Structure formats: structure tokens, C-alpha cells
Image: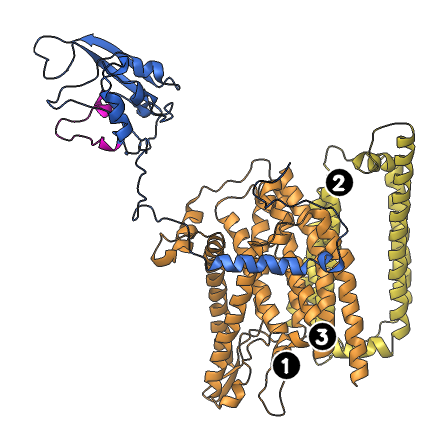
Chain colours: A orange, B yellow, C blue
Amino acid sequence: MSEVLTFKLILVFSIFGVTLLIAMYSTYLERKVAAFIQDRVGPDRAGPFGLLQPLADGVKMFMKEEIIPNVSNKFLFIVGPCVAMLTAIMAGVVIPWGGTLTINGTQYNLQIADLNIGILYIFGVVSIGVYGIMIGGWASNNKFSLLGAIRASAQMISYELAMGLSIIALIMITGTLSLQEIAAQQGGGVGSDWNMWNIVYQPIGFMIFIICAFAECNRMPFDLPETETELVGGYHTEYSSMKLGFYLFAEYINMFTSSAVMATLYFGGYNIPFINDLGLDPNVATILGTVFFFMKIGFFIFFFMWIRWTLPRFRYDQLMNLGWKILIPLAIANVAVTGLVMILMD
Amino acid sequence: MTLYAFYFISFLAVLSALMVVFSRNPIHSVLYLVITFFCVACHYLLLNAQFLAAVHVIVYAGAIMVLFLYVIMLLNLNKDDESQKSNLWKAGAVITSGLLLVVFVGALRGAEAESVSFASSNNTGLVKNLGRLLFNEFLLPFEIVSILLLAAMVGAVMLGKTHMKRAKEIAHEKNGRGSVASARGIGNIKELTK
Amino acid sequence: MTSLSGRSKVVVKKEMTLAERMYLPAILGGVIITLKHLFKRKATVKYPEKKREFSAVWRGQHVLKRDDKGAERCTACGLCAVACPAEAITMTAGERKKGEENLYREEKYATTYEINMLRCIFCGLCEEACPKEAIFLTDRLVPTEFGRGEFIYGKDKLVEPVDNRVDVTKRQTPAVLEFKKHKNLSHNR
């Protein structure tokens, strides 16, 4: 028992560390991708290829003067970024980072907690994430922050619906809400246990999901809550120092977790196709699978950035039209068609 | 252990529920209500009803309270423009809520206290069992609830439609009188809300 | 109006087709364009390590030249100040004393000579106006400062040191040299 507990503790801390590390280097990657797409070089001064840039940014963030506006609600002003960061990190709990490791005859799952409502847990945490933005925006006592907060809340609620509906079709196929089981279902070798990734069965569902993920993370085509050109900085206009850092960090962590969720739900999670047929040691296969999983996550993070530097921002009415009039009907149709096909296949 | 957790969460729930009523700032009230909902979700978890807990958080804390917060932020309620209620109103409110309390107490006194097993082996709250229950035993109430929601939705759409119609009519009248005012825009909405 | 380049397109406002209204093909096209740029050669010049060459006609920080013997050429005639469109140049004239012949070439010289580098637009008209070939623009950059006052350059910064002459041969283009030969022009007398 205590060994399992120790393992889980190590897992919790390593995932916490890896999440923060990836979020840190996402900022670096973002600047590099932006630069490369615009035919520039990007940060290259701090360390080789500018690899120490995130550290330099972090030091800068900590050293900056911390300003709390006089007219703000001081307690909520501090609570805002804390909630944003907390909910962002909490989502990683139910994601299966790999298969099972066997150490000294004991099997360890590379997942912190296998809830049988894994997807719903993530939805719950994400829906709480709005409060971070709303509280912070309101407590700033600044009209731009308030507008950003209001935009964020309306946008997130609208897109959560379409996101949930797109997932329902997937859940109908998999028959479970546990992310561990969904990931395991997509594995297999050449033999009788041959399974396709879910993207093959749910391409439209995936499309809707990824669009909604962009909106939920406040990423570029839908970054209305923090439009620099209209709202100065949106909900984090009044923030400085590490509290601003928390908001920015939370955004990148959200991006990381949503990439992980997408990879788990639609792209086979930690499974490498045909890995079972190579006859590798199970532990080696598990570690390879985890590496492969992080590669998938990396691709999705890159995709987030790639889209950001390609598409212009939506107008707010366009955003609402897309969410309510296109994505939700499409998602409902997707659910209906999936159900019909499932009945016909039986 | 579970018992202590229960007492702690219940204490928190009651405390935050009281704070909802007593805090002067409506935003604070909403945030305390969110905490209350979390405590209720924790109670569900103690009963091993994970699905209910998750849905409770998503729907109540994640969606409905966000909408509340949204509306309160838009209304910009302040201490200074809080309308002063007359004593007559206050007395009326006290009498009404007192009557409600009497009704509740009466209803609860009549109900038989059934023994409910709180054992953690009770798996009714898990998704599969809950789904079976809902779609077999309680199918009719479940569907009636969905009709209730549908009615609410239709009502909302109807309200929106009549607003749109009136807005168009007003715009038409204005244009007929030779005014330059455009058919859309905030001006008309303000006129409607008067 | 006919298009000279032949690249102009006539904008037609028409109903979009279904494929166009789905935007996905257009988004795909955009994404491919950005992907191509990802692998293109970068336009950046990494400055402190790699410096771009100045053009031959680059006009940078001014210099007040000395003649071959080391005497200042400027005679404080004020033509540069008059020519300056930005009103950046001021000076005061003084009379040369006995024993200063090796310092100043002419009998009249500039006791102070100031150029406000914040006003200067580096047009080169002072250089063109100068009849004594005393002021030139060079390929040096005006360094940044913290205060505005430090941008007013006096003679200490403008006159070239005797032992460290500034090369202005780049400014002596064939056209300029040819022009200077015509002694009948008042400018060159």
C-alpha cells in the first residue's frame, strides 16, 4: 500500500513539474513559431538558441513591481489568478500518461486517479476555470477588465455546450467515461485485438472538439477576452508581476491539458500502433508509449500556435453565431448520426 | 474519517449559505453560493455518487452561477443605488418566509424517516447504475423533466422573438417619420426596456 | 483607369458558395502558407555579430575636417546653418589670434559649433553648402543617450582629432570632385 502511495506521490510531483516545464517552454515555442512563420529568428540571445529565455522571463516576472490597484477588491484580485492556476493544474489528474509499469512484481498505473467519470471531471474543472478570469476581471475595477471577463464567461459557456455534445457521440461509441479505458480501447496489435483510433470514427466530433478547445483556452481565433487591440489586455489589464504570470501560465497549461485530452480521446492516447507486435519488454513499451503521447501533445500544442499565427480574430457576433448556430446543431446531428449508425451496425 | 469529513463539509456549506444571505455585495453572495454548491458536490462524493457530483459542479457551479455572475456584473449593483425598502415590505417578506418555513416543517414532520444506507459499497451513484435507473424505473419523470426544460426554452425564444418584432416595428415607425435612426443599435433596445 | 502592373483584381460582391461559406478550404490554404513560411530563409541579420555594410552614400554623424597640417577648415561663414532645413546648426564666430595659425586655417574661425542631433535629419545639405570642405557626413552612427542635452554635439565631438583622422573619401564621389574643379563657380572660390 505504502509503495503504491509513494509511487503516486512521485507521479503527482513529476506531472506537476512536467506540466510547469512544458508551460514554460510553450511560451518559448510560441515566440519561436511566431518568429519563424513571420520569417524572423525569434529569441536567440539567452543561452544556445535562446533556450534559457523562459528562465529569463520568469526572473523578470518575479522581479517586477507588484501593483494592486487602489480601487480594486484586493482579496478577489489575488484570488482570481490563484483560481485560474489551480483549475488549470487540477485537470491533469485524470489523464492517463502511459500504460502500466511493473516494478518488483507490482503493477503501477501511470495515472494519478482513474475516476470512472474522468471526462466529466475535466469538464467540471474547466467550467470552474472561468471563475478565475471572471473574478480577476471584476475585482480589477477596470472597464476593459470587466468587458474581458464578461466576454470570457459568455464565450466559455457557449462553447462548453458544443464541446459536451461532441464528446457525447464519442462516449456512445466507447461506452465509458473513464479516460484510462478510452485510451486502452484504442490500442492493440495486428491480431484479433486490432483497434483504430477514435478519430476514424468521429472526425466531425473531433473537428467540433478542437474548435471548442480553441475557444475554451482563449486561443487566437477566439481570444476575445484578451484582445489587445480592443481591450488593452482584457481581464488581465490591471495585473502585473507574477499574478499576470499566473494568468499567462494558466493559459499555456490549459493548452497543454486540452492537447493531452485531445490526444487521449481521439488519437489513441499513449498507444503506438502495432507496438504489441514488436515483442518489446512491457516496461520499455510503456515508456515508449509515454514518449509517443508527449509527442502527440507537442504536435497539438504546435497546432494551437500554428493556427494562432495564421487566422485573424473572430468578431464577437461571429463567435456567437459559430458557437450557437453552427457547432451546436452540427454536434447534435453528429450525435444522432452516430446513434443511427450504431443501431444499424448491431 | 468519513464522519469528520461530513461534519466539516456540512459546517462549511451552512456557513457559506449564511454568508450568501448576509453579505452586502451581490458578487460576494454569488461566490459564496458557488462554495455552497461545491460543498453539496462533496456530499454527493461522500455518498459515492460521482456522476451526480460532477454534473452538479458542471451545471450549477460551472454554468448557472457563471450566468448569475454575468448578469450581476452587467447590472453593476452598488451599495449606493440599493433601493431602500419600506418597513411594510420588510414585514411582508418576514411573514411570507415564515409561512414558507411553517409549510416546510409541516411537510417534513409528516414524512416517515426512512433509514438510508450510507455504505460506500452502495454504487447507485455510478454512471452505469444511475443510467439504468433513470431509463428503466424513472423513465417517465425523466422525460417529463425534459419537457419542462423544453417549455422553458420555447418561452425564452418567444420572448426574444417578440422583442425582435417590436424593435423592427419601432424602427419602421421612426423611418416612416423621416428620422435617420437606424433599425439596429442600442437606442431601440433602451426604448424597449423602458 | 487601366492597371499598369496588370495584377489588380476587380472586387465582385457575390453570394458565397457552400464550400466558401464553410471556410475550411480557405483556412487550409492559410495554414499551408504559414507552414511554407516556417521553413523559409529568415530575413533577420543578427546585429552585434553581423553588421550590414553601409551604402556608399550613407549619411551619418557629422565631422568637422582639419586640413593636411591639422588646422581647422571651418571659417564660421554660417552657410551650413542657413542651408539646414531642420535648424539644427548654430555657431559663433571668432577672430584668430597671433600664434594660432597652426590651429585655424582662416583668420575667422568658429569658437563654438553645435549640431543638435535630435533636430538633424541627416539630409546632407550642410555638406553641400560648405565652401571650405569643412563639414562632412560620415558612416558613423549617432549613439543613443539618456538625456536630451547630450545630443547637442559641440566642437569636442564634431572636430576630428589630429591623430585620428576620419576618412571621408566615400563622400568625394566623382560627381562631387568634378563639381569642385569649376573654380569659376562662386561656391568653389
The nearer-to-camera label among 3 and 2 is 3
Chain letter, disc 2 residue: B
Q: Position of residue A249 (x, y in %)?
A: 52, 55
Q: Is residue B67 left or right of residue B178?
A: left
Q: Is residue A134 left or right of residue A12?
A: right
What's the mark number on residue A196? 1
Q: Is residue A290 left or right of residue A205?
A: left
Q: Amino acid at mark 3?
A: Ile
Query: Observer-nearest residue: C132 or A225?
Result: C132
- Image quadrant in which you'd find residue B103: bottom right
The residue tagged 3 is: A171
Q: Secondary structure at mark 1?
A: loop
- Image quadrant in which you'd find residue B152: bottom right
Q: Secondary structure at mark 2?
A: helix
Between the residue at mark 1 and the residue at mark 3, the CA separation in whole angstroms equals 15 Å
- Quick check: can you spot residue B73? yes
Chain letter, disc 3 residue: A
Q: Amino acid at mark 1?
A: Met
N-terminal-most mark, 1 or 3: 3
Local crowd size for mark 3, using a 10 Å CA cut-off: few (<14), some (14–19), many (≥20): some
Q: Position of residue A42 (x, y in %)?
A: 43, 52
Magenta-drawn segment: C155-170
- Quick check: can you spot residue B15? no
Residue found at x 74% / y 76%: A172
Residue found at x 26% / y 20%: C154
Q: Position of residue A253 (x, y in %)?
A: 54, 60
Residue found at x 72% / y 78%: A173
What's the mark number on residue B75? 2
Q: Amino acid at mark 2?
A: Leu
The nearer-to-camera label among 1 and 3 is 1
